[in-house]
Amino acid sequence: DKTVTLPDADVTLVSGTMLATDGDGSGLSGVGKINQCIQVCKSDVTSTTSTSLVDITGITLDITPSATSSKILVMPNLYISTVTAVVVEARLYRDATIIAGDDVNNLLQWFGDINSWRGQPIGASFIDSPSTTSATTYKVQWSTASGTLYLNRPGAGTTFGASSTLTLWEILA
């Protein structure tokens, strides 16, 4: 048997039973609760030949956290391809602050030929602590050491290949 302490009562669970709520979680405290989830989906094709980091047009999203203690789970999922072997670098920003992809935090880099016929789905997840209740912008930038990078199409083709997304989850702390 296990005793679970809730804000208004203690509940003892007999082995083999489960604790259920009224369905909306309103009886639970806010810790770890998902407050909002938003996503942008980019399905058109874009490319870059930039050797310095530039915004990926359409992979930008604003969220307004409900509390300064909230965490934001940031999940970019990109479909990138090239025609030749190159180094792909990406960086994730909260407003003007780098939250992933600098030399101190996980450098987001992919080496080699990202299959020119089918592209490469590249995903990541990061927990950010913006410490604000103001609207906050998250975006992804990319660059290439040489050649052309494509988003949402095979490098060797000209047709649509997939969609790329940026998803933000506000988690109450």
Image: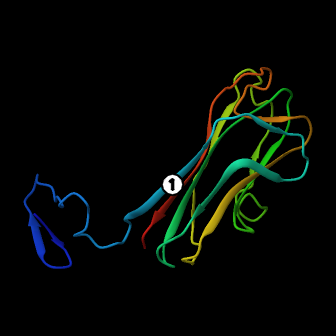
Q: Is residue 143 above or below residue 1?
A: above
Q: In this view, does 51 lie above or below 153?
A: below
Q: From the image, which quarter does the C terminus lie in?
A: bottom left
Q: Name the residue under label 1.
A: 38
Residue occupying the point 83% across, 52% down: 54
Residue occupying the point 21% across, 57% down: 23
Q: Disc 1 marks which amino acid?
A: Ile
Q: Left of 66 or right of it: where is 60?
A: right
Closest to the observer, 75 or 45: 45
Q: Is residue 172 above or below residue 123?
A: below
Q: Quadrant of residue 152?
A: top right
Q: Quadrant of residue 99?
A: bottom right
Q: How crowded is mark 1: few (under 14 residues within 10 Å), some or many (20 or more)?
A: few
Residue occupying the point 47% across, 73% down: 66
Closest to the observer, 94 or 16: 94
Residue occupying the point 60% across, 62% down: 62
Q: Where is residue 46 in the image (x, y as percent from the top left)?
A: 77, 37
Q: Left of 65 or right of it: where is 88?
A: right
Q: Left of 163 or right of it: where is 83?
A: right
Q: Quadrant of residue 164?
A: top right
Secondary element type, mark 1: strand
Q: In this view, does 124 lie above or below 4?
A: above
Q: Where is residue 127 in the image (x, y as percent from the top left)?
A: 55, 63
Q: Position of residue 22 (x, y in %)?
A: 17, 60
